[in-house]
Image (cartoon, rainbow, N blue to C red):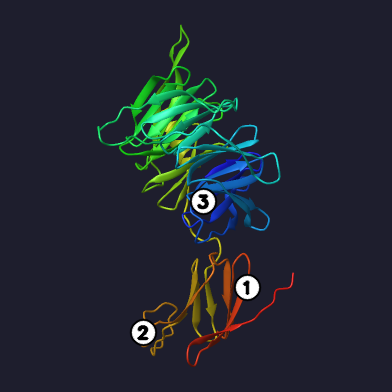
Amino acid sequence: MAYDEDSERLAVVRSDGAIEIWNMKHNFNQERVIPGSRTSKLDSVTWVKGRLFTTGFQGDITEYDLVKNTVKYSVLYGNAAWCLAANHAGTLLATGSDNGCIRLFDLTTEKVTYDRMLNPQDQRIVSLAWHKSDEIIVTGSIDNVKVWNVITGNAVQRITLQRTFKKKETIVWCVAILSDHTIVSGDSTGRTMFWDGRVGTMLKGYTSHRMDILTMCVTKDETSVFTTGVDPTIVQFTLAVTDDRLGTKAWVRNRHIAFGHTHDIRAMVIAGNFLVSGGLDTNLVTNPIKVSPGHSQIRGQIEKYKRLYHAFPQKSLIKCAGESKLLLFQYPYHLEVWKLGSTSDATDKDVASLTVSEQPLKLLDILTKGIDQIVCSSISKDGAWIAYSDVHRVKLFHLNLDVPSLQKVACFILI
């Protein structure tokens, strides 16, 4: 997931490669959906000045046309990419790849262009984040966190994480770096660690989750950090004053949020005043970021602002041909035509249970040949005509109901 502060829009990537755009201005409504394809396996998404970019295990960077709801273009460089992040100026895009390379891409032109590569390392880079100065990148990898100088392309700091088991790798799934060079890491052992990025020493460490921490986010004022992952509980850490006289501060565990999710939470982002999370259960969940002190007040504010959005389609995927008693079911890459069952019983009641004399019957499947998902479909009232479209073309068929069969009909779209 990624949030664009200027337009107040949230981009949500689904496992089938589809991208949902949610408008936060108007009560969190789904504004549009960019269909996926059989080849799109997206892993990271980001906004840059109103432009939307993704990358994934194919290794390409894709920009999208938010008017036509299609791919604008894709550029392919190197190996599979695990992570993607833009600098704060919106001029450079960084990707962390499977072969240990950090590649930088120029965003000052109309189309993304390759800029340069920082000195590669031996292990894959699974997470990265930019410092506000845009001169430092921090990356998470296997058993270590590294700090990179963007200008020289060299690693200037290496922080080695201790393994829980000698033969089991510790994977740093997510990292963040604050303005004061404090680095926050979440790893596969369930630990949230706070580091001094200048000298590489640990400031504080918590075993905050029972399993892998997969994602984290930091509030704009950098006073709170949220972590979550396979253990579907969100933990908040707050920068608190520990000594009023000396004015010293430390990161303390503040609260746990266990609402809405039943399985792994794979993505989490701060969108305005809300914390938005999503995961394997397909739900989107919003929780308030800041709550007033006091147990009863906290509970009341959370109950007031928390929301759960189920992954129901925003439009109907079932069409009915009433005259012929047929149903057309739309799936991402195929259509199904069913004939409704019937009963010989009769009743005058509004609600009654009748014996089915003829079972529902699937007449045929219509399989798509391309790689694009079906966007919309329809069937005529008499069931004789079926049409569907993807982002590039429209297909029309004539259905013979006597002997269920399809005949493709040529059609031309006038624009």
Nearer to us: label 1 or label 2: 1
- As shown in the figure, which amino acid type bears the numbered disc 1? Val
Tell me residue 165's x, y (percent): 25, 33
Residue that mark 3 sits on? 13
Q: Residue furthest left?
A: 166
- In this rendering, the answer to whether 237 lies above or below 43 is above
Looking at the image, which is closer to me, 128 or 265?
128
Label 3 element class: strand
Tell me residue 129's x, y (percent): 51, 33
Tell me residue 330's x, y (percent): 51, 70
Nearer to us: label 3 or label 2: 3
One can see residue 293 in this view: no
Residue at the spot x=41%, y=88% of the render? 346
Pick whichever of labels 1 and 2 is earlier in the sequence.
2
Residue at the spot x=39%, y=87% of the render? 343
Tell me residue 93's x, y (percent): 59, 38
Pick whichever of labels 3 and 2 is earlier in the sequence.
3
Q: Check disc 2: other Cα within 10 Å, few if <14, some if 14-19, many if 20+.
A: few
Number of numbered discs present? Answer: 3
Residue that mark 2 sits on? 356
Residue at the spot x=47%, y=92% of the render? 403
Disc assigned to residue 394? 1
Pick whichever of labels 1 and 3 is earlier in the sequence.
3
